[in-house]
């Protein structure tokens, strides 16, 4: 009986040490994901207008766009944007900009990546100059498949032709 108990305790200890080793290898400080850049096409958008014309508080837009990586098809971007602040916005680079709250999902070959953040907008729907130059940074808040547990930032830079450069910077 004593040998069975000793064997059981030895196996339990070995199992616990193996689990601790596995958990240590899965720390959130080492995602193992390589940063990458994709380009999303000019989005196909549908505006749900609250009735005031142009963009105003509560207006909601849903959109999608094909995504390419190195010129080849690489997935689809789906997103929503909700107008949460009309111009002028204190933090905006100019007084004619409002603010959208964004939720984006990139559906890619090896899984999905979820993004949350904000974006400036003009009341006529054009791309604001700050988005064309500096880009906007949003949070990577998770993912599925190869991107499960992903975190970091996404920098989106709009281009004059309506496409967007999307730079994924995963936390190490």
Image (cartoon, rainbow, N blue to C red):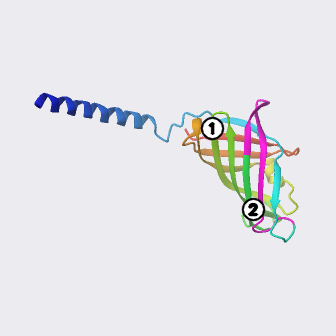
Residue 128 pos. (x, y %): 83, 55
- In this picture, residue 8 sits left or right of residue 138: left
What is the quadrant of the N terminus in the image?
top left
- Vertically, is 114 above or below 101? above
What is the quadrant of the C terminus in the image?
top right
Q: Residue at x 64, y 47 (%)?
A: 114
Q: Secondary structure at mark 2?
A: strand
Q: Secondary structure at mark 1?
A: strand
Count of number-bearing discs: 2
Q: Which residues are magenta?
A: 54-77
Query: Callout 1 environment at 10 Å: few (<14), some (14 to 19), or many (20+)?
Result: some
User: Which residue is denoted by mark 1 in the rendering?
Assistant: 111
- Vertically, is 38 above or below 116? above
Residue 36 pos. (x, y %): 68, 35
User: Which residue is denoted by mark 2 in the rendering?
Assistant: 99
- Vertically, is 8 above or below 167? above
Which circle's residue, 1 or 2, is located before the other in the chain?
2
| Quadrant hosting residue 170 | top right
Residue sitting at the far left = 2
Residue 77 pos. (x, y %): 73, 44
- Vertically, is 69 above or below 126? above
Residue sitting at the far bottom = 52
Q: Which of 83/152 is in front?
A: 83
- In this picture, residue 18 sits left or right of residue 32: left
């Amino acid at each position: 009986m004593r040998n069975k108990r000793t064997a059981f305790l030895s196996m339990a200890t070995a199992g616990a040490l193996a689990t601790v080793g596995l958990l240590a290898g899965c720390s959130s400080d080492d995602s193992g994901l390589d940063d990458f850049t994709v380009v999303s096409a000019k989005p196909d958008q549908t505006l749900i207008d609250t009735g005031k014309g142009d963009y105003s508080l509560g207006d909601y837009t849903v959109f999608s766009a094909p995504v390419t990586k190195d010129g080849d098809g690489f997935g689809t971007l789906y997103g929503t944007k909700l107008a949460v602040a009309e111009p002028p916005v204190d933090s905006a680079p100019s007084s004619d900009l409002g603010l959208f709250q964004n939720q984006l999902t990139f559906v890619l070959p090896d899984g999905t990546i979820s993004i949350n953040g904000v974006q400036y907008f003009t009341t006529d729907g054009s791309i604001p100059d700050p988005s064309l130059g500096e880009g906007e940074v949003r949070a990577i808040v998770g993912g599925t498949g190869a991107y499960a547990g992903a975190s970091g930032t996404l920098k989106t830079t709009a281009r004059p032709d309506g496409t967007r450069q999307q730079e994924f910077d995963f936390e190490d």
